[in-house]
Structure formats: C-alpha cells, structure tokens
Image (cartoon, rainbow, N blue to C red):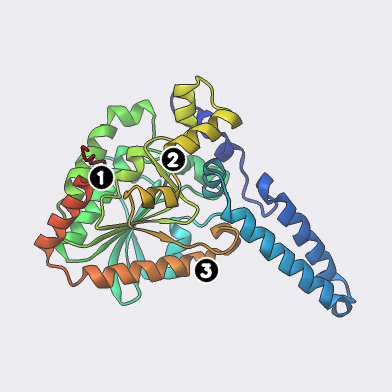
Amino acid sequence: MHGIASLALAFPTMAKAGYSGSYVLDFEQPVVEIEKQIDALEANPSAPRFAEELATLRSTRDTLLAKTYGGLTAWQTVRVARHPARPQTLDHVDAMCRDFVQLHGDRQCADDPAIVTGLARIGPFKVMVIGHQKGRSTAERIRCRFGCANPDGYRKALLKMQFAEKFKLPIVTLVDTPGAYPGIESEQRGQAEAIAVNLREMSRLRTPIVSVVIGEGGSGGALGIAVADRVAMMEHAWYSVISPEGCAAILWKEANEKTNTLAAQALSLTARQNLANGIIDAIVPEPAGGAHRDPRAASEALQGWIIDQLRDLSRVDPDTLVNLRFEKFRRMGSVRSS
C-alpha cells in the first residue's frame, strides 16, 4: 500500500488529530481538569474573592504538569512530538527569523511543500533555513503529506545548501518528519538516491551546519537534512531509525498501544537517550508541558541555542569544519572490544 492511505495507517495519531485547542493527550487530562477549574474561577465576576483558591489551583497545575512531563514514557514522548498544536518549521521561522524570503523548486521536477527553504536572519547571522513542514489544515497536511518529503524536496534542500556554501552562509535545518514519503512515484523518481546524495554532499559542505529535531525525526527522511556540525533535539522530540509503529509492525506483526509502547522503549528514541548514546550534541529545553503550550517560548529557546552554535562554528576554518563533521558521524556506533 502506498500514499496517504498508508501514512494514515502507519501514523494513526497524526491521521486522527485535529488542530483545535480542545485536543488533549490522555495523560494530560488531570492537568486539563484543573485548568478548567481555573478558567471557571477567572471568568467569575467575583474572581478577586477567589484569589487564594486560584493561587492554589495554579500551583497544583504547575506541579502536576512538571511531574507529568518529567516522567513521560518513550511512547508518550512520540505522541507529544506529534501534538497538532506543536510549532512547525514556519512557526519557528515566524518567531525567530527576520527578513525571511522563501526559495522554491529543485530545478529538476517540482517544488515540494513538505520541505521549506529560504534566506533569513537569526540574531546577527544571515542564514539559509531548511525544514520539514507538516501543514496545519487538513488540505495543507495532505498537500505536505504530513511532512514526508518527496525526492524533489531533498533535491531542493541540497540545491539551497550549495547556494549557501557558495555565498558563505551558515545552514540551519529543522527536522520534523515521520520519514521520507513511501509512495511509488517517489521511488520512481529516486527517493533513496536523493537522500544518499544529500548525506554525501552535506558531509563535505564548507559552511557551518546546525540541525535541530523539533518534533519527529524518522529514519533517512530526517537524516537527509541532518548531517550537521551540531545536532540537537527539542526536549520532547524523537529521533530514530524507524517509527514505533513501523518497528511494532515488523517485530509483532501488529501496531497497537501495547506494541507501540514496547517498540518506542526499545528504540531509545527520546532526546535524553539520543544524547546518552552520542547521536546528538544537546537538548533544547521546552516550556513546562511541551512546546505546544507555549510555542513562542519554545522558539526563543531554539533561537538562543542556534545563535550560540553559529557563534562558535563561525570561528572554525572550513577545512577543519568538514574534517570534524566527518569524524563526528564516523564515531557513531563504534564499539570497543574488551
């Protein structure tokens, strides 16, 4: 099975999710109930009389939120990363970039909306921004294929990276995809080849590259724009060779709540696990309760981390930069014999 139908089966949480503010993750329900009480008291004309009760409820809400998000399971983390209100690439661009000019097309076939590219300023730096875009409305999500890029998208990204190298601009990539698009048309146009070429070419670009997994980081679809000098993850993002559903379908022949939970745990896909395993360099903290609760604060934290990395990398000679980048990825997965 190919196309949107296969994506809906592989990623049921994404397929069913709407974008209304009423969307609630089950483990957030106790927090939401407290927030309803707070809203009711605040809407009461006699609210000043309930100042003490409001303060107690807010304190309880904040404590419960911190406890809930401090102890998320791997599968719960995946669900947070897929939250329909979670900020996407263009949301972060709007919040942290100035003078953004979007660039389109791969000069071969098409302009893939699942990958956004453009020139911008982040802090004091002129940069090339490249990121996955899932879309907001149902129509936009279908057009973007839930953030699953075609080979046209990866070729567009590479073309813009080479443009950045030519004009000595650092590259910032924002990863948010469950994986590359699995449709037959993508395979016919060279999906695997496009991603492989990106891996090769990114490894030797003579300009700083900073990459952040802002939501989902699935397989080669993520890695196709994530071969970078510095790689980070947002606190509640995930990054793995395969989605939990895909892993569960292979190992248990069925993807359900139980097998998805087991698969997510086995894949070591959370930010903390990836940091411990040396796959990423840093974790960008999110606001209490996840980026979907305070997108602007999430973007501010992301912007601060990116600026710090670009400031450090701008001092490194291009030849040294390429050598260090190669060694960084070469070390991954190395095993020492006892």
- Which residue shows up at 29% across the image and 73% down it? 125
Q: Earlier in the sequence, mark 2 or mark 3?
A: 2
Kindly state the secondary structure of the residue where label 1 is placed.
loop
For disc 3, the marked residue is 297
Judge by depth and name the residue closer to the eye, 50 or 83. 50
Residue type, numbered disc 3: Ala
Residue type, numbered disc 2: Pro
Q: In which quarter of the image is residue 232?
A: bottom left
Q: Which residue lies furthest to the bottom in this view?
A: 48
Between the residue at mark 1 and the residue at mark 3, the CA separation in whole angstroms equals: 32 Å
Of tags 2 and 1, the one toward the viewer is 1
Quadrant placement of the N terminus: top left
Judge by depth and name the residue closer to the eye, 14 or 232. 232
CA neighbours of label 3 inside 10 A, class few (<14), some (14 to 19), many (20+): some
Residue 254 lies, in percent from the top left, at 53, 22
- Which residue shows up at 61% across the image and 42% down it? 17
Q: Which of marks 1 and 3 is nearer the N terminus?
A: 3
